[in-house]
Amino acid sequence: MYYHNNQCNQENILQGIRIDEPKIFVPWDTSENAFKEMFKTSDMSVVSKGNYFVKDSTIFGERLCNLGFTFEITIRKVGISRSNYEEYHPDYMKSLAGLKTALSRSFAMFQKSLIKEFGEPSRRDKVLDEFESCEWNIGDKIKVYHYVIDRFGLSEYLFIENVQRYTKA
């Protein structure tokens, strides 16, 4: 029923989210109930009604990522975050310099993976001295956002959003 293919992710992303580990393809038109069935045997938790969190996944070749799925009838948005920044700098929690180094390395790795998957960003803006805000607009249906902001401390954000209009089936 659900599959994982080797199709180019530029085309794939218009249909849904390809997760490398667990190896599964989640179509955008997946309902909450179907989603729960797909991940019944995985380490998934419900944050709140309409929000699901899949831990320690691999996506775009990047491992140890957390995926947060938000629903509005079907999947609306997927947030991607790192489970652990220590591999990017062992002292990332001990100093601002360590945190900046870890975020800078993580950002660069995600950027490399995103460019490999989707090509160069549609839009780039400088947001902080060492970071950019990048956006991919794929087929006027999917937007990918990747940026670092300083709001209560530095944080990296990566979202994939289905911007198509939703209608009840």
Image: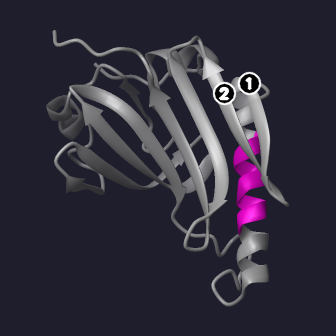
Residue 145's quadrant in the figure? top right
Q: Type of residue at label 2?
A: Trp
Residue 127 on the magenta segment: no
Quadrant assignment for the C terminus: top left
Residue 42 in view, yes or no: yes
Give the farthest residue toward the bottom: 94
Residue behind mark 2: 136
**Which residue is rendered at x = 36% and y = 51% of the image?**
54
Residue behind mark 1: 122
Residue 7's quadrant in the figure? top right
The residue lying toward the viewer, choosing from 154 and 5, is 154
**Which residue is rendered at x = 71% and y = 85% of the image?**
91
Give the farthest residue toward the right: 129
Magenta-highlighted stretch: main secondary structure? helix
- Above or below, 43 against 97 in this view is above
- Above or below, 74 against 7 in this view is below
Q: Secondary structure at mark 1?
A: loop
> Which class describes the residues within 10 Å of circle 1: few (<14), some (14-19), or many (20+)?
few
Q: Type of residue at label 1?
A: Ser
